[in-house]
Image (spheres, rainbow, N blue to C red):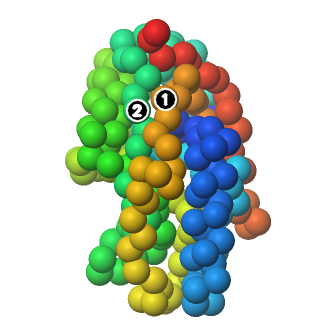
Amino acid sequence: MSTRRLFIAINLNKDIVRCLEEKVSNIMCEAPPGIRFLRPELWHITVFFLGYQDDGDLPLITEVIDEAAKNFFSPEIVLDKIIYDSLHRPRMIWAVTDQKTSESLGLIREDLEQKLIDGGLSLKNNGKKFQGHITLARFSRGNFGQKLGEINLKSRDIDAYFPETIDLMESQLSPRGAKYSVLGRSKFRE
């Protein structure tokens, strides 16, 4: 049986992408060499990384996402600031969500995780508290971008939004970078 590299995500609306593009273009001007900025079509908020899963488990995964989406109203997505993923040895630049958004998405993640485990899926839980984020850039090995500071995103810069769906995504890795495909969309409760 074949496997797929899967994750569950909130995809971004066009307004959020447009505002982030402006912020990222400003960062790119100041960025030292060795930082690879991701294309906007790759930007999303990963709610749950599932890793490699058997094709035979896709119906269970889809059913669980549908069920979880019906249990939650659309969470308000508020981006707070652009930061490094780590203060000690940063490897990425993230646009992070505010605490309330992270807590809301964390509850959805917990619900998904429990339902998937109950359904018999084998998952690895890293035990970390959930922090909603969008990966904007990755550093090449040894380049830790000390030249960039934190960039606060004011509410007037990027409006909050309420996604209609939570999506099952496939990630196909290649030397040219990842390619993401939407395998299914589940509507939040109305």
What count of labels does the image hold?
2
Single out the residue that lies furthest toward the front: 156
- Could you classify mark 1 by the number of other residues whose Cα lies within 10 Å: few (under 14), some (14-19), or many (20 or more)? some
132 above or below 39? above
Picture residue at 27% right of the left edge, 40% below the top:
100
Up the image or down, 100 lies above or below 37; here it is: above
In the image, is 71 to the left or to the right of 163? left
Q: Nearer the viewer, residue 140 or 32?
A: 32
**Residue visible at 46% across and 9% down in the picture:** 190
First along the sequence among labels 2 and 1:
2
Residue 40 visible: yes
Residue 188, image x, y percentages: 48, 17
The quadrant of the picture occupied by the N terminus is top right
Q: Indicate the secondary structure of the residue bearing disc 2.
A: loop
Work out whether residue 35 or residue 60 is closer to the camera in this orientation and state it: 35
Tell me the kind of residue under disc 1.
Answer: Phe
Asked if 102 appears above or below 153 in the picture, the reply is above
Secondary element under disc 1, as helix, strand or loop, is loop
| Residue where numbered disc 1 is placed | 162
Q: Position of residue 189 (x, y in %)?
A: 44, 11
- Residue at 50% x, 35% y is 161
**Quarter location, residue 82:** bottom left
Q: Position of residue 72 (x, y in %)?
A: 37, 17
Q: Is residue 59 left or right of residue 179?
A: left
Q: In the rendered image, which residue does mark 2 sit on?
A: 76
Amino acid of disc 2: Glu
